[in-house]
Image: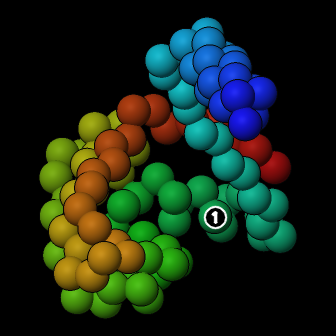
């Protein structure tokens, strides 16, 4: 019994040491391939007013309240939402740059 407790303590200590060595910040990046020309997709992404046409969150919570502010599209545009369900809560997104079109 003492051996099992000792092994468990060692395992916990190892996990804590490994966790302490990890960075305090992280980022998540996702990508997807879309079979459409960039000139057709790009305007839908950079203009937050177009998001209801394609965003899956719009279907999850159709009663979501949306607020657009700042520039009409591209850098300076801000999209805020307040969901009415647990699936689509509150948040905001801002455009920092126009990015670059990729073919």
Compared with 19, 29 (above or below) is below
Image location of residue 53, percent across then percent down: 46, 81
Q: Name the residue located 42 percent from the left edge and 86 percent from the top edge.
A: 60
Image coords of residue 44 (percent x, y): 51, 65
Q: Foreground residue, 94 or 37?
A: 94
Q: Is residue 55 above or below residue 69?
A: below
Q: Quadrant of residue 32?
A: bottom right
Which residue does the image show at 64% across and 41% down from the upper left? 29
Kindly identify the residue that appears in the image at 40 percent across and 59 percent down: 47
* Foreground pick, 59 / 95: 59
Residue 80 in the image: x percent, y percent? 22, 58
How many numbered callouts?
A: 1
Q: Nearer the viewer, residue 18 or 99?
A: 18
Q: Quadrant of residue 62?
A: bottom left
Query: Which quadrant of the view contains residue 88?
Result: bottom left
Residue 92 appears in the picture as rendered: yes
Tell me if 92 is positioned left or right of 12 in this view.
left
Q: Local crowd at mark 1 within 10 Å, few (<14), some, or many (≥20)?
A: few
Measured along the vertical axis of the image, is residue 98 above or below residue 19? Answer: below
Q: Quadrant of the N terminus?
A: top right
Q: Is residue 99 left or right of residue 89?
A: right
From this viewpoint, is residue 52 visible?
no
Would you say 77 lies left or right of 27 here?
A: left
Location of residue 84 in the rendering, given as x and y in whole percent from the top left corner: 20, 81
Residue 8 vs residue 75, the one in the foreground: 8
**SS at mark 1?**
helix
Q: Which residue is mark 1?
A: 41
């Amino acid at each position: 019994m003492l051996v099992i407790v000792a092994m468990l303590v060692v395992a916990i200590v190892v996990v804590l040491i490994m966790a302490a060595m990890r960075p305090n910040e992280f980022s998540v990046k996702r990508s997807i391939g879309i079979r459409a020309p960039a000139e057709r997709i790009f305007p839908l992404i950079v203009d937050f007013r177009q998001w209801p046409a394609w965003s899956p969150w719009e279907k999850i919570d159709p009663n979501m309240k949306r607020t657009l502010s700042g520039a009409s599209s591209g850098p300076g545009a801000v999209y805020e939402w307040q969901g009415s369900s647990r699936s689509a809560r509150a948040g905001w997104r801002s455009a920092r740059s126009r990015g670059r079109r990729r073919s």
